[in-house]
Amino acid sequence: MNNKFEFDLKDLRNKIDNIDEKIFNLINERLKIVENIGIIKNKNNISCYVSKREEFILNKLNKKYNKYISYFTISSVIKKIMYESYIKEIYCNNNISNNNNSIKIVFIGGKGKMGSIFKNLFIKYNYNVSEINSKDWENKEEKLLNSNLVFICSPISKLNFVLENIYKYITSECILLDISSIKEKSINKMLNIHSGPVLGLHPMFGPNIRSITKQIIIYSNGRYPEKYKWILNQFKLWGVFIYNLDSNKHDNYMLHIQSLRYINLFMLGSFIMNKNLNIKEIFKISPPIYKIYLSILCKFFSGDINLYLDIIYSSNKSLNLFDEYINYTKNIYNIFSSNKKRNNIINIFENIKSWLNKKNIKELSDINDTLSEEIIINNF
């Protein structure tokens, strides 16, 4: 009986292995077709990411297979395949033909991880790209001559130095652009030193992404937006989500998205370290949502503290917000410290819940469910 069981199981597993091989052969065949689609899209200035096309494919597959396969699985599988397709379209296409070579772009700080992402893409798409780094400032005049765009990828703490060293060598037609996390201060510095077009970008992603497609870049207008419209259009062709915020609003949002989060994570990491908790074991037994929380903490401490401090100290508003936050947490602690105030805690909780519901952000809870299932599937 055991022999029959083993034989039957092996036979069925062999059939599954053969199906798996066919699946991946078909995915590989699909990706080869995608490269040709990329060539056609590039020639006709069509974005690699077309949301209606993605939605059409997903709905079609769900309608056909939802009796047998869950929507989550259908969505997860096809979106991963399509994301791989976007990478093929953008990064693996060696037959790009355009007239971009007439546009001269000078990258400053292009050897850094973030700078390399942008520099390599513009090179890939035949722009006339050069770079200035810390060891070749003596050649700046020659490299900046007749440049159409200066793309500054240096930290905001180095921006004054960079601007002082380049402004004499660029024309009033040259576009000045930086990608620092603080926009009002950097844009004002560029406006004050350069009479031509100025654009502030803030990539909302880290340096370890596989593709720029479906990532977010915030842009803040500086001067003469019609002059740099082609840059934003190029990002859209790469499938980037472009979002416009004025520099003041951007920086106010970043106080909460970046500065306050950095300080919170720093405090949490310091507290856990002093408790000498076994993070590895806690991670192993934690539910998916807490694993996400711990992974964010570990990711933070694998980053560059000087970059975090540049962002925090770039504005007095960061520490003012932190003071406000600390005072607020003290008030909340005083409520929690007495069991008699239990109803107060419940009321605050319900008020926050109601406030979030009014903001119509149910999709944020859905993201949590999706991420949780991904963590379980990948056995993290």
Image: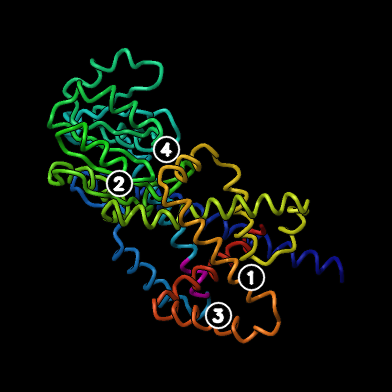
**Image quarter of the C terminus:** bottom right
Label 1 sits on residue: 333
Q: Amino acid at mark 3?
A: Phe
Label 2 sits on residue: 184
Q: Is residue 174 magenta?
A: no
Circle nearer the N terminus (3, 2):
2
Circle nearer the N terminus (2, 1):
2
Label 3 sits on residue: 349
Q: Amino acid at mark 4?
A: Met
Circle nearer the N terminus (4, 3):
4
Main SS type for the magenta part? helix
The image shows residue 28 at horizontal and vertical percentages of 45, 49
Magenta stretch bounds = 70-75
Residue 301, picture quadrant: top right
298 or 97: nearer the viewer: 298
Secondary element under disc 2, as helix, strand or loop, is helix
Q: Residue at x 58, y 48 (%)?
A: 299
The CA span between labels 2 and 4 is 20 Å
Q: Which mark is residue 114?
A: 4
Q: Is residue 166 above or below residue 341?
A: above
Q: Amino acid at mark 2?
A: Glu
Secondary element under disc 4, as helix, strand or loop, is helix
